[in-house]
Image (cartoon, grey):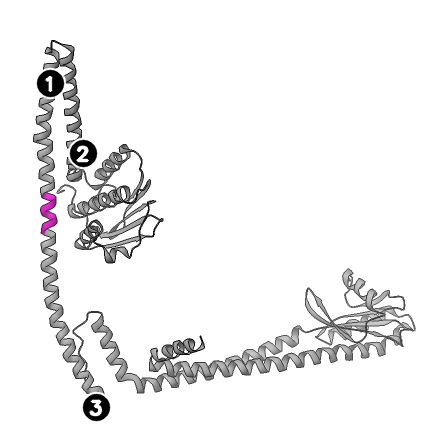
C-alpha cells in the first residue's frame, strides 16, 4: 500500500512543470516557515497571556483589598464605590470590582445602577470558598476572577474580574503584523523563483507551447531556434514536423469538405424525394382512392340486396383506412405544413398526432418564435431531430412522458428533448452503430450547430441541440 502511494507521489511530482516545481518549493517553504513561526509565537503569546491575566487579577485584588478597610471602617460606602470606579477606569483590563461584607452581601461595585443578578448569585456562592484565580466563562468571553478576603475575612471580601479583550487584541495585531511580514517575504521569494524558473525553462516552455498549439490543430506554428545546441536541433525538427502536419491537415480538410458537400446533397435529395413522394401519395393515390370511395357510395345506393350493401360498406371502410394510412405516410415523409406554415405549426401537428396514438404524453414549450421563421434548412433539421428523438423514445425507450423545449435566443435556436424512458449507457455509442443518433448529429453539424445527448440506464434520454438562427424573410419562405 505504502509503495503504491510512493509511486503515485513520484509520478505526480515528475508530471508537473519545472517552473511549477521551483515556485511550489519556494511557496511551500515560505508557508511552512510562516506557519511554524506563527504557531510558535501564538503559543508563546497565549502562555504569556494566561500568566499575565492571572497575575493582573491577583495584583488588582491585593491592591483593592489593601484599600478597602480605609472606607469600610468608617462606613464610607459612597467613597468606596468612587474608589472602585476610579480603579476600574485606570485599568483597562478590569471588567468589574465588587466588595462583599462578611455575610456575602454586596456593599459596593462598579456596575452603577444595574448590577447583574447572575453575577451576584455567583459571588454569594463562592466568596467564602474560592481560593486563588479562577477562569469564568461568560457571554462576554473569559474572565479571570479573584475573590480575596479582606483582613482575613473579618472585613468582607473583594471580587476582581479581569477580561482579556485588549491583550488578545494586541496579540492578534502582533500576529497579523508577523503574518504580513511573512507574506511579503514569501512574495519576494516567489518573484525571485519566477525569474529563476523563467531563465531556466523559457526555451522548453516555448517548445511545449508550440507542441500544444500543434495538438490543437494550429500547424502554422514556426519556432525561431535561439541556440545551436540540442534544444535548437529539437526546434528545427519540430518545425519540419509541424510543416508535415500542415500539409496532411490541408489534405484532410479538403476530403472533409468533399464529404460534407456530398452528405449535404444526399440529405437535400432525400428531403426533395420525400416531398415528391408525399405529394404524389396525397394528390394521385389519395385522390384515386377518394374517387373510388365516391363510386362505391353510388353502388351502395344501387345495391339490390343487403349482403351486397354490407360488402360495399366494408370496401368503403377499407378505403378510408387506406386513406388514413396514406395521409399518415405522407405526413411522416414530409408534412406540407412545414413548407407552408413553418416549423412551429409542423411540430404542433406532429405532437397532436403522437398524442392521438395514445400512451405517450408530450409537453412542448416554445419561446421566441413570434412572427419569424428560421431558414428552411434549419426548420427541416430541427423537425427531423424532433421526429427521430421522439420515435426513439417511444419505440426503444418505452417512454410515457416527453418534454420538448424550443427557444429562439439572440443568435441561435436551442432544442431540448427529454423523456422518462429506459435510457442507455452512452458507452454503447462507441461500440455500436446507432444510425439514428449519428444521423441527428450529422444534420446538426451540417447546420453549423452543436449536438449533445445525455443518458443513463433507467434515467431516460436528453437530447440538446443548438443551431444558428439566421432568420430568413417570411415572404420568401
Residue picked out by circle 2: 328
In the rendered structure, the answer to whether residue 457 lies left or right of residue 369 reads right
The answer to which of marks 2 and 3 sits earlier in the sequence is: 3
Residue picked out by circle 3: 229
Q: Position of residue 387 (x, y in %)?
A: 22, 43
In the rendered structure, the answer to whether residue 250 lies left or right of residue 190 reads left
Residue located at (22% from left, 69% from top):
216
In the foreground, 476 or 36: 36
The quarter of the picture where the N terminus appears is bottom left
In the foreground, 305 or 373: 305
Circle nearer the viewer, 2 or 3: 2
The 10 Å Cα crowd at callout 2, few under 14, some 14 to 19, many 20 or more, is: some
CA gap, disc 2 and disc 1: 23 Å
Asked whether residue 181 appears in the rendered view, the answer is no
Tag of residue 296: 1
In the rendered structure, the answer to whether residue 246 lies left or right of residue 174 reads left
The answer to which of marks 2 and 1 sits earlier in the sequence is: 1
In this picture, which residue range is highlighted in magenta? 265-272
* Mark 1 and mark 3 residues within 8 Å of each other at the beta carbon: no
Look at the numbered disc 1 and give the secondary structure of its residue. Answer: helix
Q: Position of residue 419 (x, y in %)?
A: 32, 45
Residue located at (11% from left, 60% from top):
257
The 10 Å Cα crowd at callout 3, few under 14, some 14 to 19, many 20 or more, is: few
Circle nearer the viewer, 1 or 3: 1
Look at the numbered disc 2 and give the secondary structure of its residue. Answer: helix
Amino acid at each position: 500500500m505504502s509503495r503504491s502511494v510512493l509511486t503515485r507521489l513520484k509520478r505526480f511530482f515528475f508530471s508537473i512543470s519545472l517552473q511549477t516545481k521551483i515556485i511550489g518549493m519556494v511557496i511551500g517553504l515560505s508557508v511552512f516557515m510562516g506557519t511554524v513561526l506563527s504557531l510558535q509565537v501564538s503559543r508563546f503569546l497565549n502562555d504569556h497571556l494566561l500568566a499575565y491575566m492571572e497575575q493582573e487579577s491577583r495584583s488588582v485584588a491585593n491592591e483593592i483589598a489593601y484599600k478597602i478597610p480605609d472606607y469600610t471602617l468608617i462606613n464610607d460606602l459612597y467613597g468606596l464605590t468612587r474608589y472602585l470606579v476610579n480603579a476600574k477606569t485606570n485599568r483597562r483590563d478590569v471588567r468589574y470590582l465588587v466588595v462583599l461584607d462578611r455575610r456575602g452581601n454586596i456593599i459596593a461595585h462598579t456596575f452603577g445602577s444595574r448590577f447583574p443578578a447572575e453575577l451576584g448569585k455567583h459571588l454569594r456562592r463562592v466568596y467564602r470558598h474560592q481560593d486563588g484565580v479562577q477562569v469564568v466563562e461568560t457571554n462576554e468571553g473569559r474572565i479571570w476572577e479573584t475573590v480575596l478576603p479582606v483582613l482575613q475575612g473579618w472585613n468582607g471580601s473583594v471580587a476582581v474580574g479581569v477580561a482579556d479583550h485588549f491583550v488578545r487584541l494586541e496579540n492578534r495585531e502582533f500576529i497579523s503584523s508577523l503574518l504580513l511580514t511573512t507574506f511579503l517575504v514569501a512574495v519576494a521569494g516567489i518573484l525571485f523563483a519566477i525569474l529563476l524558473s523563467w531563465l531556466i525553462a523559457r526555451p522548453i516552455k516555448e517548445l511545449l507551447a508550440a507542441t500544444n498549439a500543434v495538438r490543437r490543430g494550429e500547424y502554422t506554428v514556426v519556432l525561431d531556434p535561439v541556440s545551436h545546441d540540442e534544444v535548437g536541433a529539437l526546434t528545427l525538427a519540430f518545425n519540419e514536423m509541424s510543416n508535415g502536419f500542415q500539409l496532411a491537415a490541408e489534405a484532410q480538410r479538403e476530403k472533409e469538405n468533399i464529404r460534407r458537400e456530398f452528405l449535404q446533397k444526399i440529405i437535400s435529395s432525400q428531403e426533395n424525394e420525400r416531398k415528391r413522394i408525399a405529394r404524389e401519395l396525397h394528390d394521385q393515390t389519395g385522390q384515386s382512392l377518394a374517387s373510388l370511395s365516391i363510386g362505391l357510395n353510388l353502388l351502395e345506393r344501387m345495391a339490390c340486396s343487403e349482403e351486397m350493401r354490407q360488402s360495399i360498406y366494408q370496401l368503403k371502410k377499407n378505403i378510408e383506412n387506406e386513406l388514413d394510412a396514406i395521409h399518415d405516410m405522407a405526413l411522416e415523409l414530409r408534412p406540407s405544413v412545414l413548407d407552408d406554415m413553418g416549423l412551429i405549426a409542423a411540430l404542433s401537428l406532429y405532437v397532436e398526432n403522437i398524442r392521438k396514438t395514445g400512451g405517450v404524453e408530450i409537453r412542448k414549450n416554445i419561446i421566441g418564435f413570434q412572427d419569424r421563421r428560421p431558414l428552411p434548412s434549419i426548420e427541416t433539421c430541427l423537425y427531423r431531430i424532433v421526429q427521430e428523438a421522439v420515435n426513439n423514445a417511444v419505440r426503444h425507450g418505452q417512454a410515457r412522458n416527453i418534454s420538448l423545449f424550443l427557444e429562439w435566443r439572440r443568435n441561435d435556436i436551442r432544442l431540448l428533448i427529454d423523456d422518462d424512458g429506459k435510457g442507455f449507457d452512452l458507452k454503447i455509442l462507441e461500440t455500436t452503430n446507432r444510425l439514428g443518433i449519428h444521423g441527428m448529429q450529422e444534420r446538426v453539424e451540417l447546420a453549423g450547430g452543436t449536438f449533445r445527448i445525455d443518458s443513463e440506464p433507467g434515467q431516460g434520454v436528453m437530447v440538446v441541440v443548438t443551431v444558428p438562427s439566421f432568420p430568413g424573410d417570411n415572404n420568401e419562405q
